Image (cartoon, rainbow, N blue to C red):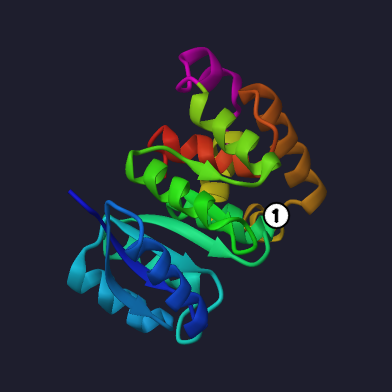
Amino acid sequence: MSIRLVLADDHPFILEGLESLFRHEPGFRVLARCIDGEQTLEAVRTHLPDILILDIRMPNKDGLDVLRELKKEKIKVKVVLLTAALDESEVTEAVRLGVRGVVLKEMAPELLIRCVRKVHAGERWTDDGYLACTLDKAAREKPLSHKMLASLTPREVEMIWMVTAGLRNKEIAEKLFISEGTVKIHLHNIYRKLNLDGRLQLLCYARDKGLI
């Protein structure tokens, strides 16, 4: 059975290239091409594709807005983010919102094909070395044990929920009436206790363990 795709990018020539790529590759079927966020949401609602290939910067709702709406509507579609550049904060947010694959536009088309196949099979994919290690390590982590939970303070647990809700350090500090420096200390302690390397790993970890 073919992998059913919706393609979303605000550059028509990129859309044409993507459709041509998948049309000439066995095992794929393109259901719709979209040039903005509103079109993308309507196409996903209508076709319920297996995979959405999504540009992060588009008019009438950008890629992150589309992801938020899909999550709000509980539409189950696997998403591959196609981007010209990797911004860590955007990628972190995208992972929190459910993105399973990240591919740079400058990469070889064969990598996008491989990414889509892997994501369709339930795996993660990113062609950036640092992020690949981060995502893979987070995906392999064991569930929180009672010992690990016991090692976290109530404030640290509260902070984990705030991070997974998408709050920045400044917002966390304002809500808890503490300084940003104190927030950073708490986060450092959380990463150390859970054997994680940073915020992105914490989000991946939380998602894989069903916390978000």
Which residue is located at x 44 percent, y 69 percent?
18
Q: Position of residue 173 (x, y in %)?
A: 70, 55
Element at badge 1? helix
Is the residue 80 above or below the residue 160 in the image?
Answer: below
Relative side of 44 to 11, left or right:
left
Are there few (<14), some (14-19), or many (20+) residues within 10 Å of tag 1?
some
115 with respect to 4 (left or right): right
Residue 132 visible somewhere in the drawing: yes
Question: Vertical placement of 151 versus 178: above or below?
Answer: above
Based on the displayed image, in which of its 4 quarters is residue 122 positioned?
A: top left
Furthest-front residue in view? 24
Asked which quadrant contains residue 24, the reply is: bottom left
Q: Which residues are magenta?
A: 142-154
Measured as percent of width and height from the top left, residue 137 is found at 58, 28
Q: Is residue 53 left or right of residue 197?
A: left
Q: Is residue 147 magenta?
A: yes
* 110 or 97, nearer to the observer: 110
Q: Residue furthest top?
A: 147
Q: Position of residue 179 (x, y in %)?
A: 78, 52
Who is closer to the viewer here, 132 or 184? 132
Above or below for 210 versus 192: below
